[in-house]
Image (tube, rainbow, N blue to C red):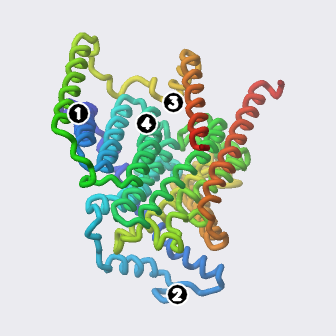
Amino acid sequence: MDISQILFYALSAMALGSAIMVVISRNPVHSVLWLIVTFFAISGHYILMNAQFLGIVNLIVYAGAIMVLFLFVIMLMNLNAEAEPQKNKWLKLAGVVAGGCLLLVMVAALKQAEVKGQIAILGTGDIGLIKNLGQALFTDYVVPFEISSVLFLSAMVGAVVIGKK
Amino acid sequence: MHSALLAIDLFLVIEKLVLIVGIVSISLVIAMYETYAERKVAAFIQDRRGPNRAGPFGILQPLADGLKLFMKEEIIPNTSNRFLFILGPCLAMMAAMMTSAVIPWGGTLNVFGRPVTLQIADINIGILYVFGVVSMGVYGIMIGGWASNNKFSLMAALRGASQVISYELPMGLSLIALLMLTGSLKMSEIVAQQMDSTWNVLYQPLGFFIFLVCAFAECNRTPFDLPEAENELNFGYHQEYSSMKLGFYLFAEYINMFISSVVMATLFFGGYDIPFFNDAAHTDWGNWLVALQGLVLLMKVGFFIFLFMWVRWTIPRFRYDQLMNLGWRGLIPLSLINMIATAAFILWKSNGYKF
């Protein structure tokens, strides 16, 4: 076990643990903060795979901007643990059944997949560096890239239209 | 397991540790004396004397202030969220300190035959790292303001967060124009290019101006200090804080000011490049040259810090809607135009100035 493997396991434990905390925290603000920790762990994984650009963009966009907006809304709504309405017992049971079904489907689907035997390549490969990534995006994948940018533009126009109302 | 773990270069670890401790303590000392400089500059502008009791010229004033903050009673409000209340100032301080990791502070030192670069981490994404850490700084404000369980603190925190997010956009856009010129995100590479040719500010004057304004806003400095507008919000997001936790918030602001001055000097004013002087021709000066370069960088930084203070004591605070209008309607279109013009010019140049 070398140092990148130790880091890999530590980051995985951190990602899973904080993701579980997102779900089980009673206070929504705590949930958001745990989600930020999850993003940090995922960014750590990106950096382990030498995808520095993806790692930092994940932090800037998700942890730095989107989560701030989440926090904004939740703080303004002032949701407290006490004010949270107690859910029906049957509703909780239904939730457990639905979640269990999803888990079952995912396990069944992934059991046959080829990724099972593969392990992540750590510390090698340089496709995640900004130069190579840019070259790949603007040559091989230029059409999907442009289409997704049009999608973003339309989302932006939509946001402005809604904001004007 | 043991062989791989022991394969780490011990000297590298020691070297980086010394660098980290050195840079952190330098930024702390500079931030400390910024508080003194701020009061002296304010006094000079308002035709007063400023602090002059502690030591000669009041030079020990920051120590006295720090001691006072440490000695004060620490109060944690009963209704606050205790853990987050403490986490807030810690995050603010941590985000402020972490930025300095990618800044090149000077050339390569020669320590007992071993080359030591005066930069903690020369990573591929240098300037994006700065952005990432800066966007983390918002959490210190937001968490602190929310955990105090006080509506004025909360409103101030939300103001601060929306201000920082709004001004990050034009800052990033003005940087894109600069990065199109340099073609690299590495801080060391950007400085090296400026050492060989002219400073980036000559190519990107508008970009620099936008960056400067956004840096003022990101640091919550006047004229953009809406989050701590005392006549509207009592005291700001740190109203419930006392003792050293309050000190951390105030201190983080001064460190941010120092770091953003360093970033501006590095990106636009040649970093540790000595003006009107060919550094490459004097490599025989060895470590003295590197020390001189570091000193020159600190002088440039000193000028920017003075600029921060000068503006603070000259220009009154914006109203909140003016602030948002300036950010979204003024700076963003301006930086977009700057970006497109730069891109068009680069394309024109690469075509050999033909259409």
Residue at horizontal 34 percent and vertical 52 percent from the top: B17
Classify 10 Å Cα crowding around label 4: few (below 14), some (14-19), many (20 and above): some
What is the quadrant of the C terminus of chain B in the image? top right
- What chain is tagged by disc 1? A
Whether residue B327 is situated above or below residue B235 in the rendered picture: above
Whether residue B51 is situated above or below residue A128 in the rendered picture: below
Q: Of A50 and B283, which appears nearest the observer?
A: A50
Residue that carries the numbered disc 1 in the rendered image: A9
Q: Are marks 2 and 3 on the same chain?
A: no
Q: Is residue A3 visible?
A: no
Classify 10 Å Cα crowding around label 3: few (below 14), some (14-19), many (20 and above): some
Badge 4 marks a residue whose secondary structure is helix
Residue that carries the numbered disc 2 in the rendered image: B52
Q: Is residue B50 left or right of residue B132?
A: right
Classify 10 Å Cα crowding around label 2: few (below 14), some (14-19), many (20 and above): few
Residue A58: assigned label = 4
Q: Amino acid at mark 4?
A: Asn
Disc 2 from disc 1: Cα separation? 56 Å
Disc 3 from disc 1: Cα separation? 26 Å
**Number of the front mark, 4 or 2:** 4
